């Protein structure tokens, strides 16, 4: 029963963070204009840096969640093995 409460709390916390997203579109037009100006002038360094940053921000949460899931699975598997031993 204790595990169900923990799972429910984690699920509620994740749902809370998914539903409480703040709109952050304010800078998109300014960034796009700046990048278009730099690329049209032949400077692609800033655009490449921003694209790398976007990919980093995109991949980091998935990596963290994957690591948590892996360690949770491994701990659960070891606990079951010790329970039957």
Image (tube, rainbow, N blue to C red):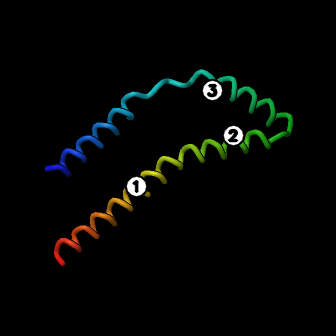
Q: Residues within 10 Å of mark 1 (few under 14, many from 20)?
A: few
Q: Residues within 10 Å of mark 3 (few under 14, many from 20)?
A: few
Name the secondary structure under disc 1.
helix
* Rendered position, 38 above or below 7: above
What percent of the width, then of the height, locates residue 81?
A: 23, 74
Q: From mark 1 to mark 2, how far is it between C-alphas?
A: 28 Å
Evaluate if marks 1 and 2 touch, with contact meaning CB atoms under 8 Å apart.
no
What percent of the width, then of the height, locates residue 79?
A: 25, 67
Name the quadrant containing residue 80.
bottom left
**Mark earlier in primary sequence (1, 2):** 2
Please state which of residues 42 and 49 is positioned toward the viewer in this rendering: 49
Evaluate if marks 1 and 3 touch, with contact meaning CB atoms under 8 Å apart.
no
Residue carrying label 2: 50
| In the displayed structure image, the side of residue 47 where residue 27 appears, left or right | left
Residue at position x 63%, y 24% in the image: 27
Name the secondary structure under disc 2.
helix
Q: From mark 1 to mark 3, how far is it between C-alphas?
A: 32 Å
What percent of the width, then of the height, locates residue 14?
A: 34, 39
**Mark earlier in primary sequence (1, 3):** 3
Q: From mark 3 to mark 2, how far is it between C-alphas?
A: 12 Å
* Badge number at residue 68: 1
Please state which of residues 5 and 59 is positioned toward the viewer in this rendering: 5
Name the secondary structure under disc 3.
helix
| In the displayed structure image, the side of residue 24 where residue 78 appears, left or right | left
Please state which of residues 30 and 68 is positioned toward the viewer in this rendering: 68
Residue carrying label 3: 28
Name, please, the residue furthest toward the top: 26
Residue at position x 17%, y 49% in the image: 2
Tag nearer the camera, 1 or 3 = 1
Residue at position x 28%, y 37% in the image: 12
Residue at position x 59%, y 21% in the image: 26
């Amino acid at each position: 029963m204790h595990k169900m409460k923990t799972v429910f709390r984690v699920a509620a916390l994740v749902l809370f963070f998914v539903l409480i997203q703040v709109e952050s579109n304010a800078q998109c037009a300014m960034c796009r204009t700046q990048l278009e100006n730099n690329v049209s002038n032949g400077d692609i360094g800033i655009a490449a840096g921003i694209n790398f940053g976007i990919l980093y921000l995109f991949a980091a949460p998935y990596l963290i969640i994957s690591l948590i899931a892996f360690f949770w699975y491994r701990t659960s598997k070891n606990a079951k093995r010790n329970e039957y031993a």
